[in-house]
Image: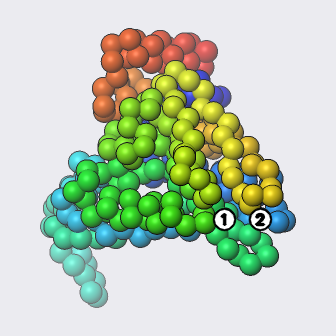
Amino acid sequence: MRSPFPGMDPYLENPGRWAGVHNGLIAAIRADLNRHIRPRFVADADATVYVVAAEDRRWVYPDVFVIEARQAVGAGVGARIEAPVQVLVDGPETFSDPYVVIRDSANLDVVTILEVLSPINKAPSTSQARSDFLRKRSGTFASRTHWVEIDLLRAGERTPEVRGAGDYCVLVKRSNTAVAGVWPIGLRDRLPTIGVPLRDDADDVPLDLQAMLDQVWTDGGYADLVDYAGSPPPPALDAADARWAAEQVRQWREASA
Protein backbone atom coordinates (compact mmCIF):
# COMPACT_ATOMS: atom_id res chain seq x y z
CA MET A 1 0.00 0.00 0.00
CA ARG A 2 1.21 3.48 -0.86
CA SER A 3 0.56 6.87 0.67
CA PRO A 4 -2.49 8.77 -0.60
CA PHE A 5 -0.14 11.38 -2.06
CA PRO A 6 2.13 11.21 -5.12
CA GLY A 7 4.81 13.31 -3.40
CA MET A 8 5.22 14.49 0.16
CA ASP A 9 2.42 13.39 2.47
CA PRO A 10 1.44 16.58 4.38
CA TYR A 11 -0.08 14.51 7.21
CA LEU A 12 3.42 13.29 8.08
CA GLU A 13 4.40 16.85 8.97
CA ASN A 14 2.69 16.59 12.35
CA PRO A 15 5.53 17.64 14.70
CA GLY A 16 4.56 14.97 17.19
CA ARG A 17 5.08 12.30 14.53
CA TRP A 18 7.96 13.84 12.62
CA ALA A 19 10.72 12.24 14.70
CA GLY A 20 9.74 8.78 13.44
CA VAL A 21 9.54 9.97 9.82
CA HIS A 22 12.85 11.81 10.16
CA ASN A 23 14.70 8.87 11.68
CA GLY A 24 13.27 6.54 9.05
CA LEU A 25 14.42 8.84 6.24
CA ILE A 26 17.93 9.10 7.68
CA ALA A 27 18.19 5.30 7.91
CA ALA A 28 16.76 4.75 4.41
CA ILE A 29 19.00 7.38 2.82
CA ARG A 30 22.10 6.03 4.53
CA ALA A 31 21.37 2.47 3.37
CA ASP A 32 20.60 3.55 -0.19
CA LEU A 33 23.75 5.66 -0.48
CA ASN A 34 25.93 2.80 0.77
CA ARG A 35 24.57 0.53 -1.96
CA HIS A 36 25.97 2.97 -4.52
CA ILE A 37 29.09 4.61 -3.09
CA ARG A 38 31.05 1.85 -1.37
CA PRO A 39 33.84 0.91 -1.16
CA ARG A 40 35.48 4.27 -1.95
CA PHE A 41 33.02 6.17 0.24
CA VAL A 42 30.78 5.21 3.13
CA ALA A 43 27.62 6.86 4.45
CA ASP A 44 27.66 7.12 8.21
CA ALA A 45 25.20 8.48 10.78
CA ASP A 46 25.93 11.29 13.19
CA ALA A 47 23.84 13.62 15.32
CA THR A 48 23.85 17.23 16.41
CA VAL A 49 22.87 17.75 20.03
CA TYR A 50 20.94 20.99 20.57
CA VAL A 51 20.19 22.59 23.92
CA VAL A 52 16.49 23.45 23.77
CA ALA A 53 15.28 26.25 26.01
CA ALA A 54 11.88 25.96 27.69
CA GLU A 55 10.31 28.56 25.39
CA ASP A 56 11.45 26.58 22.31
CA ARG A 57 10.36 23.17 23.57
CA ARG A 58 7.18 23.28 21.49
CA TRP A 59 9.35 22.81 18.37
CA VAL A 60 10.37 19.41 19.74
CA TYR A 61 7.33 18.44 21.85
CA PRO A 62 4.53 20.52 20.34
CA ASP A 63 1.62 21.30 22.66
CA VAL A 64 2.56 18.36 24.91
CA PHE A 65 3.21 19.66 28.39
CA VAL A 66 0.92 17.22 30.21
CA ILE A 67 2.83 13.97 29.96
CA GLU A 68 0.57 11.63 31.89
CA ALA A 69 -2.55 11.79 33.99
CA ARG A 70 -2.97 8.88 36.38
CA GLN A 71 -3.71 7.74 39.88
CA ALA A 72 -0.93 5.66 41.39
CA VAL A 73 0.05 4.81 44.93
CA GLY A 74 3.31 2.94 45.44
CA ALA A 75 3.64 -0.12 47.61
CA GLY A 76 6.65 -1.99 48.93
CA VAL A 77 10.29 -1.02 49.32
CA GLY A 78 11.17 2.33 47.75
CA ALA A 79 7.57 2.99 46.83
CA ARG A 80 6.57 6.45 45.61
CA ILE A 81 3.26 8.21 45.78
CA GLU A 82 2.81 9.79 42.37
CA ALA A 83 0.93 13.00 41.65
CA PRO A 84 -2.10 12.51 39.38
CA VAL A 85 -0.65 14.74 36.64
CA GLN A 86 2.94 14.72 35.39
CA VAL A 87 4.22 17.85 33.59
CA LEU A 88 7.40 19.04 31.95
CA VAL A 89 9.21 21.60 34.08
CA ASP A 90 10.73 24.75 32.68
CA GLY A 91 14.40 24.60 31.91
CA PRO A 92 16.71 23.67 29.04
CA GLU A 93 17.08 20.10 27.80
CA THR A 94 19.00 18.42 25.01
CA PHE A 95 17.66 17.18 21.69
CA SER A 96 19.62 14.87 19.40
CA ASP A 97 19.06 15.48 15.68
CA PRO A 98 20.52 12.76 13.40
CA TYR A 99 21.96 13.38 9.94
CA VAL A 100 24.02 11.53 7.31
CA VAL A 101 27.71 12.07 6.67
CA ILE A 102 29.56 10.63 3.69
CA ARG A 103 33.19 9.85 4.42
CA ASP A 104 36.16 9.03 2.23
CA SER A 105 36.99 5.45 3.18
CA ALA A 106 40.73 6.04 2.77
CA ASN A 107 41.06 8.69 5.49
CA LEU A 108 37.52 9.05 6.94
CA ASP A 109 37.41 12.72 5.92
CA VAL A 110 33.86 14.06 5.72
CA VAL A 111 33.00 14.64 2.07
CA THR A 112 29.29 15.47 2.28
CA ILE A 113 26.78 16.30 5.01
CA LEU A 114 23.12 15.50 4.31
CA GLU A 115 20.49 17.07 6.58
CA VAL A 116 16.78 16.29 6.61
CA LEU A 117 15.39 19.30 8.45
CA SER A 118 13.48 18.92 11.71
CA PRO A 119 11.11 21.47 13.29
CA ILE A 120 13.92 22.56 15.64
CA ASN A 121 16.00 23.58 12.59
CA LYS A 122 13.14 25.82 11.47
CA ALA A 123 12.39 27.47 14.81
CA PRO A 124 12.32 31.29 14.90
CA SER A 125 15.62 33.08 14.49
CA THR A 126 15.54 33.99 18.19
CA SER A 127 15.95 30.31 19.10
CA GLN A 128 19.40 29.22 20.29
CA ALA A 129 18.97 25.85 18.58
CA ARG A 130 18.18 27.62 15.30
CA SER A 131 21.28 29.79 15.70
CA ASP A 132 23.39 26.68 16.36
CA PHE A 133 22.03 25.01 13.22
CA LEU A 134 22.71 28.06 11.04
CA ARG A 135 26.23 28.31 12.48
CA LYS A 136 26.90 24.68 11.59
CA ARG A 137 25.48 25.29 8.12
CA SER A 138 27.55 28.40 7.40
CA GLY A 139 30.67 26.66 8.72
CA THR A 140 30.11 23.81 6.28
CA PHE A 141 29.53 26.30 3.45
CA ALA A 142 32.97 27.75 4.15
CA SER A 143 34.67 24.35 4.24
CA ARG A 144 35.64 21.67 1.70
CA THR A 145 32.54 19.65 2.59
CA HIS A 146 29.43 19.52 0.41
CA TRP A 147 26.05 20.28 2.01
CA VAL A 148 22.70 18.69 1.10
CA GLU A 149 19.59 20.14 2.79
CA ILE A 150 16.19 18.44 2.43
CA ASP A 151 13.22 20.44 3.73
CA LEU A 152 9.96 18.45 3.76
CA LEU A 153 8.20 20.69 6.29
CA ARG A 154 5.94 23.56 5.30
CA ALA A 155 5.91 25.01 8.81
CA GLY A 156 8.71 27.05 10.32
CA GLU A 157 11.31 29.48 9.07
CA ARG A 158 13.13 28.63 5.85
CA THR A 159 16.85 29.04 5.42
CA PRO A 160 17.65 32.32 3.61
CA GLU A 161 18.50 30.94 0.16
CA VAL A 162 15.25 29.00 -0.30
CA ARG A 163 12.58 31.28 1.12
CA GLY A 164 9.57 31.05 -1.15
CA ALA A 165 10.99 28.10 -3.11
CA GLY A 166 7.90 25.88 -3.19
CA ASP A 167 6.05 24.05 -0.45
CA TYR A 168 9.14 21.88 0.04
CA CYS A 169 12.64 22.15 -1.34
CA VAL A 170 16.11 20.67 -1.56
CA LEU A 171 19.33 22.68 -1.57
CA VAL A 172 22.74 21.32 -2.61
CA LYS A 173 25.78 23.50 -1.90
CA ARG A 174 29.00 22.15 -3.40
CA SER A 175 32.25 22.96 -1.67
CA ASN A 176 33.93 24.52 -4.69
CA THR A 177 31.34 27.12 -5.62
CA ALA A 178 29.35 29.98 -4.13
CA VAL A 179 26.27 28.87 -6.09
CA ALA A 180 23.80 26.39 -4.61
CA GLY A 181 21.41 24.20 -6.59
CA VAL A 182 17.77 24.29 -5.49
CA TRP A 183 14.90 21.92 -6.25
CA PRO A 184 11.59 23.73 -5.51
CA ILE A 185 8.86 21.15 -4.81
CA GLY A 186 5.11 21.71 -4.81
CA LEU A 187 2.63 19.78 -2.70
CA ARG A 188 1.35 17.95 -5.79
CA ASP A 189 4.82 17.14 -7.17
CA ARG A 190 6.66 13.85 -6.94
CA LEU A 191 9.78 14.30 -4.83
CA PRO A 192 12.82 14.58 -7.12
CA THR A 193 15.84 12.42 -7.66
CA ILE A 194 18.73 14.64 -6.63
CA GLY A 195 22.46 14.35 -7.22
CA VAL A 196 24.56 13.93 -4.07
CA PRO A 197 28.08 15.29 -4.69
CA LEU A 198 31.21 13.36 -3.73
CA ARG A 199 34.82 14.06 -4.73
CA ASP A 200 35.54 16.12 -7.86
CA ASP A 201 36.75 13.01 -9.69
CA ALA A 202 33.64 10.98 -8.77
CA ASP A 203 30.18 11.14 -10.32
CA ASP A 204 27.27 12.42 -8.27
CA VAL A 205 25.21 9.61 -6.76
CA PRO A 206 21.47 9.77 -7.54
CA LEU A 207 19.13 9.78 -4.56
CA ASP A 208 15.46 9.12 -5.29
CA LEU A 209 13.74 10.98 -2.45
CA GLN A 210 10.28 9.72 -3.40
CA ALA A 211 11.43 6.12 -3.15
CA MET A 212 12.93 6.88 0.27
CA LEU A 213 9.70 8.47 1.55
CA ASP A 214 7.53 5.67 0.14
CA GLN A 215 9.71 3.11 1.93
CA VAL A 216 9.45 5.00 5.22
CA TRP A 217 5.67 5.37 4.88
CA THR A 218 5.24 1.64 4.25
CA ASP A 219 7.77 0.34 6.77
CA GLY A 220 6.56 2.74 9.46
CA GLY A 221 2.93 1.60 9.23
CA TYR A 222 1.67 5.11 8.61
CA ALA A 223 -1.47 3.80 6.93
CA ASP A 224 -2.54 2.83 10.45
CA LEU A 225 -0.79 5.56 12.45
CA VAL A 226 -2.06 8.60 10.55
CA ASP A 227 -5.59 9.90 10.99
CA TYR A 228 -6.53 10.95 7.49
CA ALA A 229 -10.06 11.94 8.58
CA GLY A 230 -9.08 15.48 9.52
CA SER A 231 -7.03 18.19 7.87
CA PRO A 232 -3.24 18.10 7.53
CA PRO A 233 -1.31 19.84 10.32
CA PRO A 234 -0.64 23.60 10.06
CA PRO A 235 0.05 25.70 8.17
CA ALA A 236 -3.36 25.39 6.55
CA LEU A 237 -3.42 24.56 2.85
CA ASP A 238 -4.98 27.05 0.49
CA ALA A 239 -8.49 26.22 -0.72
CA ALA A 240 -7.42 24.58 -3.99
CA ASP A 241 -4.74 22.43 -2.37
CA ALA A 242 -7.09 21.49 0.48
CA ARG A 243 -9.67 20.22 -2.02
CA TRP A 244 -6.95 18.35 -3.91
CA ALA A 245 -5.60 16.75 -0.72
CA ALA A 246 -9.09 15.68 0.36
CA GLU A 247 -9.64 14.09 -3.05
CA GLN A 248 -6.35 12.16 -2.80
CA VAL A 249 -7.43 10.78 0.57
CA ARG A 250 -10.90 9.89 -0.73
CA GLN A 251 -9.49 7.98 -3.70
CA TRP A 252 -6.96 6.22 -1.49
CA ARG A 253 -9.64 5.10 0.92
CA GLU A 254 -11.81 3.76 -1.90
CA ALA A 255 -8.85 1.85 -3.36
CA SER A 256 -7.99 0.45 0.09
CA ALA A 257 -11.51 -0.66 0.95
Which quarter of the rendering shows the N terminus? top right
Tell me where residue 47 appears, x and y as whole percent. 50, 67
Q: Is residue 85 left or right of residue 5?
A: left
Q: Foreground residue, 191 or 138? A: 138
Crowding around mark 2 (Cα neighbors within 10 Å: few <14, some 14 to 19, many 20+) is many
Badge 2 element: strand
* x then y, percent, for residue 53: 23, 65
Q: Quadrant of residue 96?
A: bottom left
Q: Quadrant of the C terminus?
A: top right
Residue 138 visible in the shown view: yes
**Amino acid at the residue labelled 2:** Phe
How far apart are the alpha carbons under marks 1 and 2? 9 Å
The image shows residue 84, relative to residue 3, as above or below, that is below
Nearer-N-terminus badge (1/2): 2
| Badge 1: residue crowd in 10 Å (few <14, some 14–19, many ≥20) | many
Q: Work out whether 25 lies above or below 198.
A: above
Q: Residue furthest right?
A: 39
Q: How is the image coloured?
A: rainbow
What secondary structure is found at the residue carrying circle 1? strand
Identified by mark 1, the residue type is Val
Q: Which residue is mark 1?
A: 111
Q: Position of residue 218 (x, y in %)?
A: 62, 38
Q: Is residue 244 above or below residue 85?
A: above
Position of residue 154 relative to residue 46, above or below, is above
Name the mark on residue 41: 2
Residue displayed at 35% across by 55% down: 120
Tell me the residue at 74%/60% (across/down): 199
- Which residue: 34% across, 39% down? 155
Determine if residue 221 is in view: no
Label tally: 2
Please give the label number shown on residue 227: none
**Residue 106 locus on image (x, y percent):** 79, 76
